[in-house]
Amino acid sequence: MYINNRINSTQEGRNYYGILQIQVVCELGSRPVENAEIQIFHKYDPNTVVDTLITDNSGKTIEIELPAPPIEYSMEPTNYQPYSEYRLVISAPGLQTIIIDSAQILPFVKTIQPVSMPRREDDTNISNTITIGPNYLFGNYPPKVYEDEVKTEIEEQVDKSVVIPEFIIVHDGLPSDLTATNYKIEYREYIKSVASSQIYATWPQETIYANILTRLSFSLNRIYTDWYHRLGYDFDITSSTAFDQIWFYGRNIDSNISLAVDYMFNYFLSLPDVRQPILTQACTGELITCQNMISLWGSKFLGDQDYKAIDILHTYYNETMYINYTNNITGIQAWPNVELSEGSRSDAVKLMQQYLLIISHVYSEIPIIEADGIFGPETKSAVMAFQKLFELPVTGTINAVTWYKIAQIYQRLTQASEFCK
């Protein structure tokens, strides 16, 4: 298999692999697409098929191992690209062909490529190419222009609770670029894309947590303050690294980052006596450190020294900063603050059973259960099937992360007014 010299120049005779799995849904209704065909090409050898995969009835392919560069390339700044790239061509009857250019594969990391396929309106099949740019640490992007991390004038005017949005509207360009597309993206999926685009999933766990917290808080500050709407725009945030944070529509999501966001999506960073989430800004930290911003590479090296996430944050931000959270989540009933497990009896159990029942009509791997408010063996089996399907730890109990994931998938499936046939 041909590998770009820039990526592979020092890995002769060494075997490094990452894992890729593709998940395909129809754009209308978010239903899984069965029997979609995915052809995988190396980005720099577009005429040779590496493999061809077919989705199952949940819209997922098998996991496939793909060659990746040495892990050392993502452990410190280097001129060698730390991930390999694969071009994906996804096709299915009646749906528009999607080309992903390209999925980024890190060594020892499982990554998930989500694909949303629009319905084809006529007999023509014009493909839609989704272009994914380099990771923030490897590309050439404008640095963040520093701004006050607390919007004092808004703090004095606004007195409201922090609410986690269901969606965020992302302007894919500079704020002033009227030709750039606005995308309405699920908030959690947006954060997963930002984090996967900004850091490397090979980094220490506490470093990943610290950086996800900064992305969550930054995003919620933009929403809480209505920053761009106050300036007359019709979006919440941009993909410009000079103004906001890097983001790519349709990029692959590294599974450890995805799981961390599922656990942390309702967190943000606070300062004493400040209501708004803090606008926690970031820089690469490769050549210089940036005052009052987290250094991405610096945070990695602190993680290497076993710093906890909060200690990493205190290194770059005010030492009084603390991790905050809210259960005020748009459209979702709050977590009841108690784990639901076999033997539990409550209205909360009944609600989750009702949600799982609806989800099981779309995802047949989840057994059909009775919504009686009693957490019996059948409910445990359904929960375990759901957790396995949606990449959560398979425990058979409903903790906060499983509660909110079940609610998210239920919302996704029930909000659509039109479906693919």
Image (cartoon, rainbow, N blue to C red):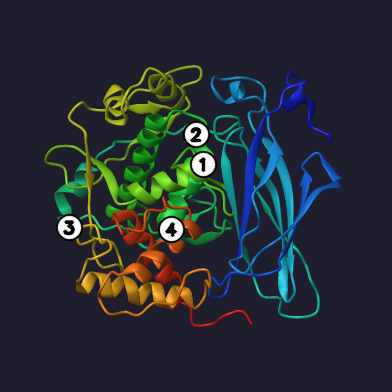
Residue 9 placement (x, y as % from top left): 76, 21
Tell me what residue is drawn at x 25 percent, y 68 percent.
333
- Which mark, by number, is residue 160? 3
Query: Which amino acid does the dot numbered 2 rest on?
Result: Ile
Do the numbered discs 2 and 1 sit on residues whose CB atoms are within 8 Å? yes
Disc nearest the viewer among 3 and 4: 4
Q: Name the residue under label 2.
A: 199
The answer for how far apart the CA atoms under marks 2 and 3 are is 32 Å
Earlier sequence position, callout 3 versus callout 4: 3
Q: In this view, does 169 lie above or below 370?
A: above
Image point (76%, 80%), residue name: 122
Among the two numbered marks 2 and 3 on one chain, the one whose residue lies closer to the N terminus = 3
Disc 2/disc 1 C-alpha distance (Å):
6 Å
Closer to the observer: label 4 or label 2? 4
Real-space Cα separation, disc 1 to disc 3, in angstroms: 31 Å
Image quarter where the C terminus lies is bottom right
Residue that label 4 marks: 387
Could you tell me the amino acid type at mark 1?
A: Ser
